[in-house]
Image (spheres, rainbow, N blue to C red):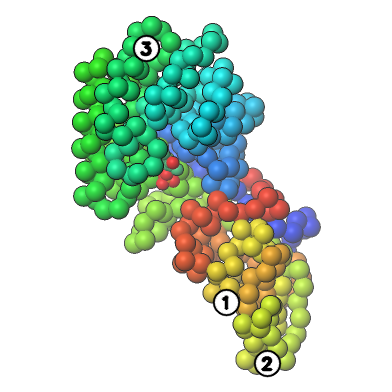
Amino acid sequence: MTGTAASGVAREAIIDRGAIEHNVRALRAATGTHEFIAVVKADGYGHGAVTAARGALAGGATRLGVADVAEALALREAGIHAPIIAWLHAPGADFGPAIAEGVEIGVSDLDQLRRIAAHAGGRTPLAHLKLETGLGRNGAAPEEWAALFAEAAGLEREGRLRVDGIFSHLSGASRDEDVAQLRQFEEALAGATSAGLAPRLRHLAATAAAIDLPETRLDAVRVGLGIYGLSPFDDRSAADLGLRPAMTLRAPIAAVRRVSAGHGASYGYTYRAERDTTFALVPLGYADGVPRQASNVGPVRIHGRRFRVAGRIAMDQFVVDVGDTHVAPGDQAVLFGDPLRGAPSAADWADAAGTINYEIVTRIGPRVRRTVVE
Ligand SMILES: *Cc1c(COP(=O)(O)O)cnc(C)c1O
């Protein structure tokens, strides 16, 4: 994906919807669960929630997962009618509009359960009980399970709601700790059964466990990162997992300047040219989600060659020292994309910035135009 920009787009994330479709199909085949929940929260990890949802559903996802009910409602507004579950709520959140749109609610406590059951619309609310099995985030704690299950079963008998799922989320701290959470979860499921609940969907695994810990797959997996073609593992690339990165971040070089040895690049002169050289200016900065921590380290591909950021990444732009390579304004600088096509990876940028690939794609800002290709 090099070559010149004909369109005059300054900053562009090319989103390969076909890659998302491919990744879901591959992960679905590998995990073999009855259902596949594609996680499209946070604007589809920066790829665009609607694009991600459409790609995932085309690849065989049976449901979508988001954090906030507002994210679920935005998908409905875009015409997406697939089942959606939303699991993280502000205190006192109004579930009415979501229930009216058939959005399934992740329920972490009795208060949420009661407020869902109080919904007076024509639709029976669908709940997925969220259980804390060790991660220390939301979800009902083991000492609350019995009361939650009893109340849920009572409300279900009265026809006020239906408990369609029960779920929890793993820490990924180690295999042993994930298995310990699975055992806790199994105990909870037994408690739910004795309370008279019969949830159709028991779900626990996100991308890493879905791939690596088959016993956590249960009735459904909830996969985010993997559907975008990124690996959650340090020791295996996306290609090793048969996944195709769906986002390419690029910008046409905005300016080119020949400089003498000793010339500084960007604020604070943390980089100086060692010899006479060429500076190329890339119009992407930390306002666009390019991490400033990757100053002097982040990789950039121009004309099929890999360079590094020279000096500090600024709000809107950074410099690349391209040496004597002939570069002209409009030539494309690719920050990350599919390594099989020569681009650096989102993981390379994560390493450069001391973070994870999840954050690299999710933080891409609103100035970056998303261009969807098949
Ligand atoms: C974000 C999230 C996921 C997806 O995690 P990945 O590691 O991206 O697959 C699954 N379940 C819950 C509860 C989440 O918050």
Report the quarter where the N terminus lies. Answer: bottom right
Residue 274 picture location, percent across and down: 62, 91
Q: Amino acid at mark 2?
A: Gly
Residue placed at 47% from the left, 62% from the top? 355
As drawn, the label of residue 156 is 3
The vertical placement of 165 against 244, above or below, is: above
Q: Nearer the viewer, residue 162 or 234?
A: 162
For numbered disc 3, what is the local secondary structure?
helix
Q: Residue at x 58, y 73 (%)?
A: 295
Distance between the alpha carbons at the discs numbered 3 and 2: 74 Å
State if disc 2 and disc 3 touch (CB < 8 Å): no
Q: Residues within 10 Å of mark 2 (few under 14, many from 20)?
A: some
Q: Identify the residue at image location x=22%, y=32%.
A: 186
Splitting the image into four quadrants, where does ligand 1 fall?
Answer: top left
Label 2 sits on a secondary structure element that is loop
Mark 1 nearby-residue class (10 Å; few <14, some 14–19, many ≥20):
some
Per the image, the residue denoted by label 2 is 262
The span from disc 2 to disc 1 (Cα, nearest Å) is 16 Å
* Residue type beneath disc 3: Glu
Q: Quadrant of residue 286?
A: bottom right
Residue, disc 1: 296
